[in-house]
């Protein structure tokens, strides 16, 4: 009798297992955040990864939107999901205007984001360094025309980056300010090449036109190597910035190089893209 009962239980278990499995296994649907494009580039002789996040209501109307160009804008180990998430948050809770986020992925950061150095040690450690001008040309001649031709931008643009990407933001602001309306440099690596860019900032600022632009600078508790060139840049801005430039430097002593980006980027969104008051 026990054998019959055991056999019956085993048989029932075998019969019921597929049913139970079918009831407890949820359906899987991929989560899609934005669209990735392989942009052909004559500057680099191949394709480059460009990632685009559009506001949720983009497809339902004909509205135009500010465009935020994000450096280090790849989806793997870079900042596209982080920064597009802040844009999405501002849309959901109504704290910022809708924004198109264009992430420009980096391949060789010291090649693309650092200006040339004469420092033998840096050259030995990073032999491909120093082609930021080439990357700037890629942005101006290939990325911006692609975005302007495909998406409904309002003509209002900003460039954002952190660390070496912040260095590139500052260099672009100083040397080609007409490329963007606003610049956000978080923890910029102004120490590069002994702080030469910060030292030369005054000469570049004297060549600027008095067009309205915004420059947002911020730095955590990152030691004298980072602080000293930032202090020099701020001094040059005080002495030489045109009246139409809306610039600010916000120290963040409670943050490190590893922790500064989130809060700084959120504050930049709120400053650059505020919701209009009634």
Image: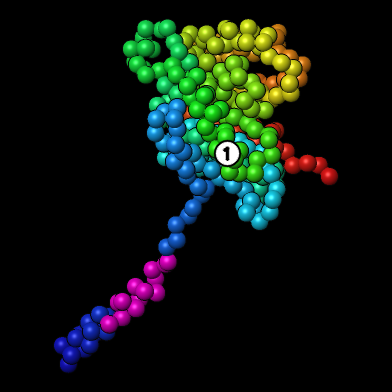
Q: Residue furthest right?
A: 278
Examine the rendering and report whether any part of residue 85 can be seen: no
Q: Indicate the position of residue 42 as horizontal and vertical percent values.
A: 44, 30
Magenta stretch: dominant SS?
Answer: helix
Q: Indicate the position of residue 116 as horizontal and vertical percent values.
A: 45, 13
Give the camera-side residue of 84 and 37. Answer: 37
Task: Check disc 1: other Cα within 10 Å, few if <14, some if 14-19, many if 20+.
Answer: some
Examine the rendering and report whether any part of residue 192 can be seen: yes
* Rendered residue at 45%/61% (across/down): 29
Give the camera-side residue of 45 and 139. Answer: 45
| In this view, 171 is above or below 55 | above
**Magenta stretch encompasses residue 22:** yes
Q: Residue furthest bottom?
A: 1
Q: Residue furthest front?
A: 42
* Rendered residue at 46%/38% (across/down): 39
Query: Which residue is labeled 1 in the image?
Result: 147
* Span highlighted in magenta in the image: 15-27
Left/right of residue 69 with respect to residue 24 in the rendered view: right
| In this view, 216 is above or below 93 | above
Colour theme? rainbow
| In this view, 18 is above or below 51 | below
């Amino acid at each position: 009798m026990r054998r019959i009962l055991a056999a019956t239980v085993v048989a029932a278990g075998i019969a019921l297992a597929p049913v139970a499995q079918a009831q407890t296994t949820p359906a899987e649907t991929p989560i899609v955040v934005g669209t990735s494009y392989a942009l052909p580039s004559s500057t680099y002789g191949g394709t480059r990864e460009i990632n685009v996040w559009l506001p949720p209501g983009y497809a339902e109307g004909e509205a135009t939107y500010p465009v935020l160009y994000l450096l280090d804008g790849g989806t793997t180990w870079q900042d596209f999901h982080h920064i597009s998430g802040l844009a999405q948050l501002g849309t959901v809770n109504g704290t910022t205007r809708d924004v198109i986020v264009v992430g420009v992925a980096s391949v060789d950061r010291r090649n693309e984001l650092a200006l040339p150095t004469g420092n033998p040690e840096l050259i030995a450690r990073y032999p491909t360094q120093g082609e930021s001008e080439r990357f700037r040309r890629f942005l101006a001649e290939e990325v911006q025309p692609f975005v302007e031709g495909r998406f409904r931008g309002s003509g209002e643009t900003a460039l954002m980056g952190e660390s070496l990407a912040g260095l590139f933001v500052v260099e672009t602001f100083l040397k080609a300010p007409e490329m963007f309306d606003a610049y956000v440099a978080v923890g910029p690596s102004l120490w590069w090449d002994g702080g030469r860019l910060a030292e030369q900032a005054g000469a570049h600022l004297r060549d600027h036109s008095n067009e309205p632009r915004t420059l947002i600078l911020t730095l955590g508790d990152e030691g004298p190597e980072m602080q000293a060139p930032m202090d020099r840049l701020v001094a040059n801005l005080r002495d030489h910035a045109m009246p139409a430039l809306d610039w600010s430097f916000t120290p963040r002593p409670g943050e490190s190089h590893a922790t500064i980006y989130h809060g700084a980027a959120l504050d930049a969104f709120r400053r650059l893209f505020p919701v209009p008051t009634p």
